Image (cartoon, rainbow, N blue to C red):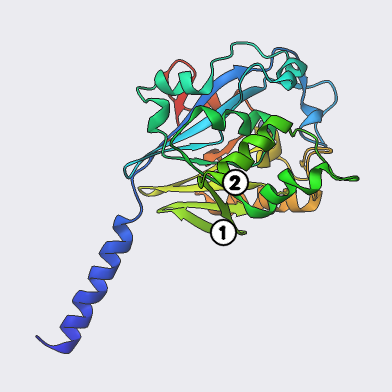
């Protein structure tokens, strides 16, 4: 065989391998609770018109494919005291939301935590086999500096700190170091919004499409649709938050594939596959 033909075949082989590594994931948003009170949009987007409310929900996201069942965030158990501040209604425990989906809690292979606020991290304990992924600086702040004088522990619950320490001791915690890291084939995390000390959002490549699961790095569609729409008092870096909203738009073919963290409209903009579940496609 001619050398040039061999090189050509080898390069096609390599291309073939890298193509196969982008799995055809199915991506779902699961709504497990609603905020049971009128929620001012201005609490989530600093330039929002006064008097306008948003229908706010609590969600987790499920990525299925490539032999994995991956959660982005894990929700919360309803006995956590903070849930009362939001008059939580229509609550389904996140592991039950998974069962409803035909999966057992033990089937969840991975959990990617966008940040350690109680409504995103508290439910990790429900999934006994999951490997858990979190930004290293976010974890270190969560278990350390946040509780020191001058630290910011807003949205952090002590039982979640203890749970994460145990998870680390048990060898199931994987600390991710920084921006633009591919954790699993086709699943990459990005930092810079600093909703918490170093929060992250998730880009999923599936088939020919790309989806950003923004979590609280884009609270609502209003944040995505407007400039200067960082949340007041909910980021360490307002300019960084806005910059990441703009960056998200460069990562997807259409802004509709940026999925915000707490906006009920997600569940009307995509096709319903089960009660409280939409498929992002
Ligand atoms: Zn949240």
The image quarter containing residue 114 is top right
Quarter of the figure with residue 152:
top right
Q: Which numbered marker is on residue 118?
A: none
Q: Residue at x 52, y 23 (%)?
A: 94
Residue closer to the observer: 18 or 75: 75
Residue occupying image coordinates x 43% and y 36% = 129
Q: Is residue 139 above or below residue 109?
A: below
Number of residues whose C-alpha sits closer than 10 Å to that of mark 2, classed few (under 14), some (14–19) or many (20 or more): many
* Mark drawn on residue 201: 2
* Rendered location of residue 107, percent (x, y): 38, 32
Residue positioned 82% across, 36% down in the render? 47
Is residue 214 visible in the rendered image? The answer is no
Q: Quadrant of the C terminus?
A: top left
Residue 154 position in % (x across, y down): 80, 35
Report if the beta carbon of the residue with label 1 is closer than 8 angstroms to ligand 1: no
Query: Which residue, as the protein is rendered here, is positioned at the far bottom?
Result: 3
Are there few (<14), some (14-19), or many (20+) residues within 10 Å of tag 1? some
Vertical position of residue 59 compared to residue 204: above or below: above
83 horizontally vs 29: left or right: right
Dividing the image into four equal quarters, which quarter contains ligand 1?
top right
Residue located beneath label 1 in the image: 180
């Amino acid at each position: 065989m001619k050398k040039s033909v061999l090189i050509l075949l080898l390069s096609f082989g390599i291309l073939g391998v890298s193509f196969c590594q982008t799995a055809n994931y199915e991506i779902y948003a699961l709504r497990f609770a609603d905020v049971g009170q009128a929620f001012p949009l201005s609490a989530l987007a600093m330039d929002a018109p006064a008097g306008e409310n948003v229908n706010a929900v609590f969600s987790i996201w499920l990525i299925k494919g490539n032999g994995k069942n991956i959660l982005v965030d894990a929700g919360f158990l309803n006995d956590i005291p903070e849930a009362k501040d939001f008059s939580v209604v229509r609550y389904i425990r996140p592991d039950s939301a998974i069962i409803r989906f035909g999966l057992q809690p033990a089937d969840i292979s991975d959990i990617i935590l966008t940040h350690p606020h109680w409504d995103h991290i508290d439910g990790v304990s429900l999934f006994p086999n999951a490997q858990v992924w979190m930004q290293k600086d976010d974890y270190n702040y969560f278990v350390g500096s946040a509780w020191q004088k001058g630290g910011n522990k807003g949205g952090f619950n002590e039982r979640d700190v203890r749970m994460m320490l145990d998870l680390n001791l048990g060898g199931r915690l994987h600390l991710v170091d920084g921006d633009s890291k591919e954790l699993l084939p086709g699943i990459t995390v990005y930092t810079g919004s600093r909703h918490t000390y170093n929060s992250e959002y998730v880009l999923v490549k599936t088939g020919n499409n790309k989806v950003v699961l923004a979590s609280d790095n884009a609270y609502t569609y209003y944040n995505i649709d407007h400039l200067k729409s960082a949340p007041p008092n909910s980021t360490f870096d307002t300019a960084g938050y806005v910059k990441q909203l703009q960056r998200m738009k460069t990562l997807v073919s259409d802004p509709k594939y940026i999925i915000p963290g707490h906006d009920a409209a997600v569940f009307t903009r995509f096709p319903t596959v089960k009660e409280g579940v939409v498929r992002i496609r």
